[in-house]
Amino acid sequence: MSTPVLHVQHLVKQFGEFVAVNDISFDIKPGEILGLLGPNGAGKTTTIQMLLGLVTPTAGSIQMFGLDLATDREAILQQVNFSSTYVSMPQALTVEENLWVIARLYGLSQIQQRVDGIVKRFEMGDFRHKVTRKLSSGQSTRLGLAKAFLTEPKILFLDEPTASLDPDIAQKIRSFLKEERRSSGLSVLYTSHNMHEMEEMTDRIIFLQKGKIVAEGTAQEIVARFGQTDLEEVFVKLAREE
């Protein structure tokens, strides 16, 4: 059995009296795509923020690559990246300038070659010299994804990665992600409100509700457990129960 690349134990985050994340534990194996599912306010974003070292847990531990995030933050984050439809890149820079900044922050070599490759892969050639604030929502999403893949991470946190994309580009992104997983063993934590996408992309899913894990397993196992016909029906059932 392979050693997890991410190991979370009894993670808790409180903001005053409010418990946003309530004693959750889970692993991600090498090359696994783990879905993080739940209604708005379930604790998904807070969980990701703790995994990125942006928010300090109230209790519990986070380990990646056998290292503790609390003590080895820099070494861990060099091998991690993140993309969200809802997080913008610096608006005054062009697409290419933003990618160059990320490459230099991560200490990458052969930067122009890497940037050219990722621009081509995400079909951004037509707007690579465009100022970021003038991008469409779909173009901004592609820039965020390009930023995330540019550094060749071992773990990638993706928050609604295809939410603003047209169906053609979204399918290409999903295919690219599967290809990267096969070729490099990339591990992914994947959130989406597109239930069909979650069923297609994930190996396992953990379902959060009010900060707690209320279901865990493959999409098929979760659907069967709740006696529904698909994951969307499970989501609606749990959201309404909340």
Image (cartoon, rainbow, N blue to C red):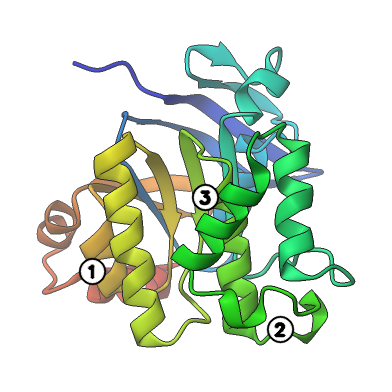
Number of marks drawn: 3
Q: Secondary structure at mark 3?
A: helix
User: Quarter of the image containing the N terminus?
Assistant: top left
Q: Looking at the rendered structure, which numbered label has been put on residue 135? A: 2
Q: Is residue 9 left or right of residue 61?
A: left
Residue picked out by circle 3? 149
Q: Is residue 25 above or below residue 189?
A: above
Q: What residue is pinned by disc 1? A: 231
Disc 3: CA contacts within 10 A as few (<14), some (14-19) or many (>=20): some
- Residue that appears at 68% across and 14% down: 72
Residue at 42% across / 72% down in the picture? 193
Residue 169 in sight: yes
Query: In terms of sequence position, does the residue under pointer 3 or pointer 2 come before the other?
Result: 2
> Residue 163: where, in percent of width, then height?
49, 77
Q: Residues within 10 Å of mark 1 (few under 14, many from 20)?
A: many
> Identity of the amino acid at label 2?
Leu
